[in-house]
Image (tube, grey):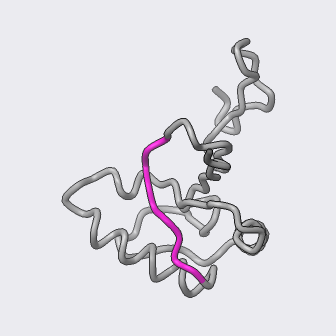
């Protein structure tokens, strides 16, 4: 049985992001989130980059190579990259997500974009 995996968004969550520059450009690491991911990795947890950057098939390999390089430099390891949720994902850390209480539709937090 899987212990599940933790999805971590790249742009704006793990790496600083203000606006799109290029597929190969990834912002500076966000220290608090990098430390959190490193701790999870040290605990043996399955952590994956969860990013829309790899949703375009024509740019996936170039983009994944840039993300792998960024991970190696900033996390000390290359971790899996995906844009697909599955039943084994136990949490998602993302600057755009709003948590919803299971089976109720009630927001746990609030929209940072006023929605």
Residue at the image position 51 percent from the left and 80 percent from the top: 70
Residue range corresponding to the magenta coloring: 77-85
Image-based side of 96 in relation to 21, left or right: right
Residue lying furthest top: 104
Our reading of the magenta stretch's main secondary structure is loop
User: Which quadrant would the C terminus be assigned to in this image?
Assistant: top right
Q: How many marks?
A: 0
Q: State the image coordinates of residue 59 (x, y, percent, origin top left).
A: 25, 63
Residue at the image position 68 percent from the left and 44 percent from the top: 91
Residue at the image position 27 percent from the left and 69 percent from the top: 61
Q: Splitting the image into 4 quarters, where does residue 77 fall? A: bottom right
Q: Splitting the image into 4 quarters, where does residue 13 fall? A: bottom right
Residue at the image position 56 percent from the left and 64 percent from the top: 17
Image-based side of 63 in relation to 86, left or right: left
Is 15 magenta? The answer is no
Q: Splitting the image into 4 quarters, where does residue 33 fall? A: bottom right
Q: State the image coordinates of residue 11 (x, y, percent, origin top left).
A: 54, 61
Instruction: Examine the rendered structure and indicate whether residue 81 appears above or below residue 85.
Output: below
Q: State the image coordinates of residue 7 (x, y, percent, origin top left).
A: 60, 52
- Residue closer to the observer: 38 or 19: 38
Residue lying furthest front: 1
Residue lying furthest left: 58
- Residue closer to the observer: 43 or 38: 43
Q: State the image coordinates of residue 88 (x, y, percent, origin top left).
A: 57, 42
User: Which quadrant would the N terminus be assigned to in this image?
Assistant: top right
- Residue closer to the observer: 18 or 35: 35
Is 83 magenta? The answer is yes
Instruction: Examine the rendered structure and indicate whether residue 18 appears above or below residue 112.
Output: below
């Amino acid at each position: 049985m899987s212990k599940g995996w933790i999805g971590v968004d790249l742009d704006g969550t793990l790496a600083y992001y203000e606006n799109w520059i290029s597929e190969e450009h990834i912002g500076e690491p966000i220290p608090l989130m990098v430390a959190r991911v490193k701790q999870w990795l040290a605990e043996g947890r399955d952590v994956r980059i969860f990013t829309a950057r790899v949703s375009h098939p024509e740019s996936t390999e170039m983009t994944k190579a840039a993300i792998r390089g960024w991970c190696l430099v900033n996390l000390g390891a290359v971790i899996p990259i995906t844009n697909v949720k599955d039943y084994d994902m136990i949490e998602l850390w993302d600057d755009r997500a709003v948590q919803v209480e299971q089976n109720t539709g009630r927001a746990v937090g609030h929209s940072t974009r006023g929605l």
